[in-house]
Image (cartoon, rainbow, N blue to C red):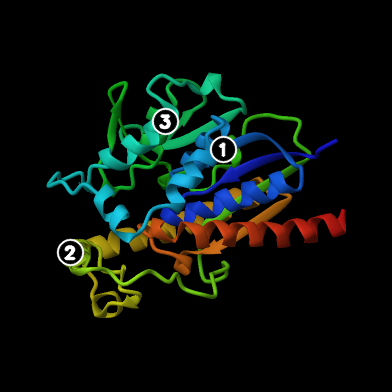
Amino acid sequence: MPKKVALSLSAGGARGLVHIGVIHELQRRNYEIVAISGTSMGAVVGGVFAAGELSAFTEWVKGLDKLDVLKLIDFTFSVQGFIKGDRVFKEIKNFLGDDLTIEQLKIPFVAVAACLERGDAQVFESGNLYTALRASMAIPTVLTPILFEQKTLVDGGIVAPLPLQWLPKSDAAIVIAVDVNADEKGAVMEKPSKQPKPNSFQKKFETKFWGKVEELWPFGEKDGEVSKQKENKTNYMNLALRSFDIMQNYLTDIALEKHPPDIIIKVGRNAADTFDFFKAKELIAFGEDLAAKALDEYESNN
């Protein structure tokens, strides 16, 4: 009889693809996932899995190269964020449809966003799944927020980057938390992703894109190298997002102290940048490897 697992998946941008690898390893070992809570990218992966669409989603994201990722990013001049997110969420909607509700999912699922007016968590335990995922992933100052029932909702990482406290009640024997937004103590991939050299059109497009991103958010990578801006420049966006990272670490530590899981898997923030979805194959394999090591240790002691 398979062991039952409750899974809490953290925020973390493209690093959240590690969650897919963790789920793959659990399935490989015949563990049954009976409850999921997720924030931001953790909510997306958890929600897609609970909807039974993880295989299709995984194949799609593995097929993304650098140019594909750039095409999915729709810049806006809104004061609420510099990316609308319509393109990427249109792709996600292809897997979920318009009308799928959380109540219809095969596995009990919770997504967490943050309400700006109330200053607390907006916990989606029911209702439209797409709306819940879009709200949970609205990174402040980056992705534009959404309006829901006269409330402004943004990324749940503000209140619960690792939403252990909102795991649905279950008869799970094991609680596993996956934190892909950890500090320097978290694991990182040893080998960087190798991308094919861009053609002249791709290079021009990428240069234009990274120029825009670095103007606002100067700590990405260009052509596999850390930019001088990443090393030396600090601006408003840099300060805001670095502060967001520190806050998430602090809140995650509190969640782990108050709701200690049986297994914790930590991935360092420097394992990949927020937009590095073109590293999907490596990040998923990395998650599989980390989960295998964590489960081996747990099984040997229990």
Q: Quadrant of residue 151?
A: top left
Q: Dot 1 corresponds to which residue?
A: 37
Seen in the image, is 191 located left or right of residue 157? right
Quadrant in the picture for residue 168 = top right
4 is higher (above) or lower (below) than 222: above
Residue at label 2?
A: 201
> Mark 3–mark 1 contact, CB under 8 Å?
no
Q: Nearer the viewer, residue 159 or 262?
A: 262
SS at badge 1? strand
At label 3, counting other C-alpha atoms closer than 10 Å, the crowd grade (few under 14, some 14-19, many 20 or more) is many
* 15 lies above or below 175: below
Residue 44 locus on image (x, y percent): 46, 40
Q: Quadrant of residue 152?
A: top left
Q: Residue at x 33, y 47 (%)?
A: 139
Q: Residue at x 38, y 58 (%)?
A: 274
Rendered residue at 32%/59% (across/down): 241
Write the residue at 53% across / 32% down: 110
| Earlier residue among tags 3 and 1 | 1
The percent coordinates of residue 58 (x first, y second) are: 50, 46
In the rendered structure, the answer to whether residue 146 lies left or right of residue 131 reads left
Identify the residue under disc 3: 132
Dot 2 or dot 1: first in sequence order is 1
Q: Are marks 2 and 3 in contact (CB under 8 Å)?
A: no
